[in-house]
Image (cartoon, helix red, strand yellow):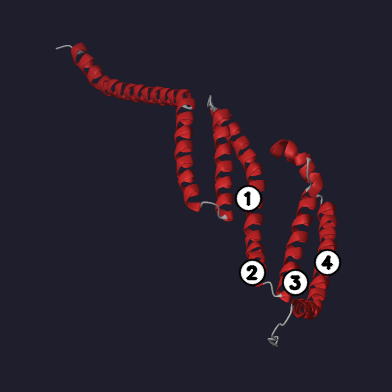
Amino acid sequence: MPTPVIPINNWGDAVFLATTNALNMFLAAIPLIVGALIVLVIGWLLSNVLGSLTTRLLTRAGADRLFARHGPDVYGSVATSWQPSVVAAEVIKWVIRLIFLIAAANILGLTQVSQLLNQVILWIPNLIVAAIVLMVAPLLARFVRGVIETGAGEMGFSNARLLGRLAEYAIISFAVIIAINQIGIAATLVNILFVGIVAALSLAFGLAFGLGGRDVAAELTRQWYDSSRERMTRASEKVGGSERVADRPALAGAQGSRARPK
């Protein structure tokens, strides 16, 4: 209901009218404020309960023990400063709190705040995916590095460790680029950087493979040459032996004809 316009005759009436309007607006907003506070309290309590439940489930599942056992070897000193169960619980807590905060902003009619928080909520899954990629990539990179170093070492490559390192760095670089793209930061610049990294790693891998496999390639070529030469020698010996066998009857006939008396 619009406030009626009353002609102001003195400053006392002006102050009284302004105070009355402000008080009316405050009294009208009290139910909305109370409702928003109730929603926030419920969201805060629910987030704490679900966060504690997540921590207990992951702890019983052994996530913290597994990370404490293998995490420092892959992530270094960073692994000693946090636990997977605590991180997952905090993420769930703040996602739930943001959802209830959006509801409270809608109750108060703060549409701009609600839209901003909605964008944050929609962006959180991308952030979670990027974090998972960055967590899994070092594990995969370490595994691939070990496989390449072992296989290349057994094949006789002198640069087996270099090949393993290049593969590890390549996987981590790709993971970082994927994570940045997932978050949506400077996609065009990241794509250009990705092409440059692929070209550089391809060149480095080719050089390492060529230099490291030079001795192996020479050995394989020598073995192939020796085996080919040996087969050719055997084949020539067989041909020569068959020719000698074929010449023996003719030689025997000639000798017999010479031995007969006339």
- Label 2 residue SS: helix
Whether the residues at callouts 3 and 4 have beta carbons within 8 Å, the answer is no
The mark nearer the N terminus, 3 or 4, is 4
Task: Name the amino acid type tagged 1.
Answer: Val
The circle drawn on residue 112 is 2
How far is mark 2 from mark 4, CA to CA?
A: 25 Å
User: Does residue 113 appear to the left or right of 168 in the view shown?
Assistant: right
Query: What residue sits right under mark 4 in the picture?
Result: 46
Residue at the image point whose x is 65% and y is 62% from the top: 120
- Label 1 residue SS: helix
Along the line of sight, the residue nearer the viewer: 211 or 174: 174
Residue at the image point whose x is 25% and y is 17% from the top: 252
How far across and down, in percent of the image, does residue 105 sit? 72, 71
The mark nearer the N terminus, 2 or 1, is 2
Query: What residue sits right under mark 3 in the picture?
Result: 104
How far is mark 2 from mark 1, CA to CA?
A: 32 Å
How far is mark 1 from mark 3, CA to CA?
A: 33 Å
Above or below, comparing residue 112 to residue 181 in the picture = below
As drawn, the residue found furthest toward the front would be 10
- Label 3 residue SS: helix
Picture quadrant where residue 246 is located: top left
Give the mark toward the camera: 4 or 1: 4
Query: What residue sits right under mark 1 in the picture?
Result: 133
- Label 4 residue SS: helix
Task: Name the amino acid type tagged 3.
Answer: Ala
Task: Name the amino acid type tagged 4.
Answer: Leu
Give the mark toward the camera: 3 or 4: 3
Along the line of sight, the residue nearer the viewer: 227 or 112: 112
The quadrant of the rendering that contains the C terminus is: top left
How far across and down, in percent of the image, does residue 59 sit? 84, 52
